[in-house]
Structures are given as structure tokens and as C-alpha cells.
Amino acid sequence: MQDWLTVHEGSAPLVIGLPHTGTDIPAAIEARMTSPWLARKDADWWVDRLYDFAVDMGATLVRTGVSRSVIDVNRDPSGVSLYPGMTTTALCPTETFDGEPLYQAGQEPDADEIAERRAIWFDPYHAALQAQLARLRSRGPVVLYDAHSIRSVVPRLFEGELPQFNIGDNDGATCAGDLTQAVEKACAISGDSVVVNGRFKGGWTTRHYGRPQTGVHAIQMELADRGYILDPTDPVSPNNWPSPYQPDRAEPMRGHLRRVLTACIAFAESQR
């Protein structure tokens, strides 16, 4: 196993993907970027730590330590946009969510380099996901839960403040409606805002693997990160972002997410 790829095998019918929590950038790539901070600005900060309790629930976790600014393993490898007509980032992003350039002029990756990065990082990550889904699917239906977070306010991507819990199943295509409803209900108990298939309908991982007719039910959770860390009200800068992980602040959210993952496992077991 590569040192940047972490797989924890569990026995419950639940695989959790962690595609955007990494911050590792090879030195040769980082040297071409505009700043180390911008290169890591859009990470799903602390999400792997937020969900670490899932190990004790028997979940399988697959995580890449490589920054999404090197390659985004949750984008269509063909380059097709997941949200046609809307602002989004590419397989190998060249700008931040806020539109700031990631690379110095003329240093952006070309097609050959993008293909190389895909072979080094994208393909092994998805081979690991596929292997774990196949291992658990041999025992019955399984849920793939793709775990994400984002700043609550990113004007270039969406208007206003994002709901706390953003559930995506690509308009009902990637999992059974009963699973989506169970996850939505588990989130609603928190009293926080919940939306299904709003700005985020599920990335490439959810759409690629979600085949409920064959027993793989994929769902994405995009959290507004104010639910577990301090989300700055001022524009983010190296002085205030990323906010540090505060266990006491995060604990209520971990309780809500435990309820969500319990619902996912219960759903998969009910299909066996």
C-alpha cells in the first residue's frame, strides 16, 4: 500500500470515502504553485478526524493524503463537468474555489502531466475503493458514503450560506430512496438545516459507484464546516484559515454523524 493511501478494513456494510482531506503536495509541484496556503485552502479540513469514530462502528475507510489541488479524485477523469453551466474545479485544478490561480503563469499541468497524475494517484485510490466495495458486496448490499465539507460561504460556487447538511444522491439515481430518507431524517434530528440534491448532488465517486440495482448504494454528505470548526466571518486568509480542530466544538456534530452512519448500516443490513 502506498504511504499516501490509507485503507482501514471493517466488517460493517459501509465504506466511507475521504477524497479531499489530504494536504500532501510533492515538492516539485508545490514549487510551481503561487503559494502553499492557496494550494491547501480548499481541503476538507479535519474531516478524517471528524469521522474517526466510524472505525469503532465497523466501517471501512479509504483516504488519500494527497491534496485535491494535485488531483481531485472526486472528479470525472474524462474532464466532463459534474455540474454543466456552473462553476466547479477540474480533475487537476488550476484555481481555488474563489477563482485564485493555483499555479504561476505558464506552470499549469498539461495533458501528459494530468494523465501521469491520474495513473499515480487517481487510479490507485479508486482501485482501493472498488476492492473494498467488492469485498463487502460479496456478503450483501453495501453503502458507499462519500464524506466532505466546505466553507459555509463561497460566493463563487453558491449564493448565501450553505445548509449544514447537504445530501446528494444525484436526484435519486445512486441509492435507494429509503437510504436517502433515513439519512435526511438522521440529520434533521439535529435541528440544523438539511437539503437533498441542492448545490451538491454527489460527485464522481457517488455517481460512478452508485448502482442500487446491483446492491451498491452511494450517497454524498457535504457538511458546512461551521458545524464542527470556527467558520470565519471575514474573508479567509493565512491568518484565520484553516481553523484549528476543537474536539469540544466538534463533539455534537460527531454525535449527529454517528446517527447518520448508524442509519446507513441499518439500511444495508435491512437489504440482506
Image: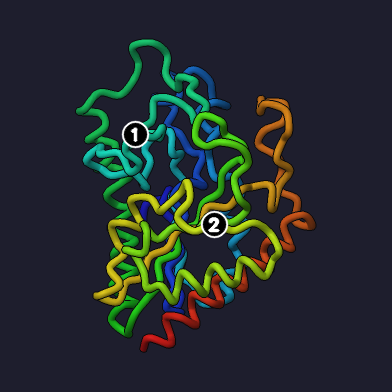
* Residues at marks 2 and 1, CA–CA distance in whole angstroms: 21 Å
Does 44 appear above or below 236?
below
Q: Which residue in the structure is indicated by mark 2?
A: 195
**206 is higher (above) or lower (below) than 212:** above
Whole-percent x, y for residue 255 in the image: 69, 68
Q: Position of residue 87 (x, y in %)?
A: 41, 32
Image quarter of the C terminus? bottom left
Left or right, 72 with reference to 120: right
* Of callouts 2 and 1, the N-terminal one: 1
Task: Check disc 1 and report its element: helix, strand or loop.
Answer: loop
Amino acid type, residue under disc 2 in the picture: Val
User: In terms of image quadrants, where is residue 107?
Assistant: top left
The residue at 64%/47% (across/down) is 225
Could you tell me residue 79's position as x and y percent?
25, 37
Q: Give the residue at mark 1.
A: 85
State the residue lying farthest toward the right. Answer: 248
**The residue positioned farthest toward the top in the image shown:** 105
Is 146 on the left-hand or right-hand side of 37?
left
Q: Quadrant of the N terminus?
A: bottom left
Q: Which mark is residue 60?
A: none
From the top left corner, tell me how far across and down residue 204 is, in percent: 33, 50
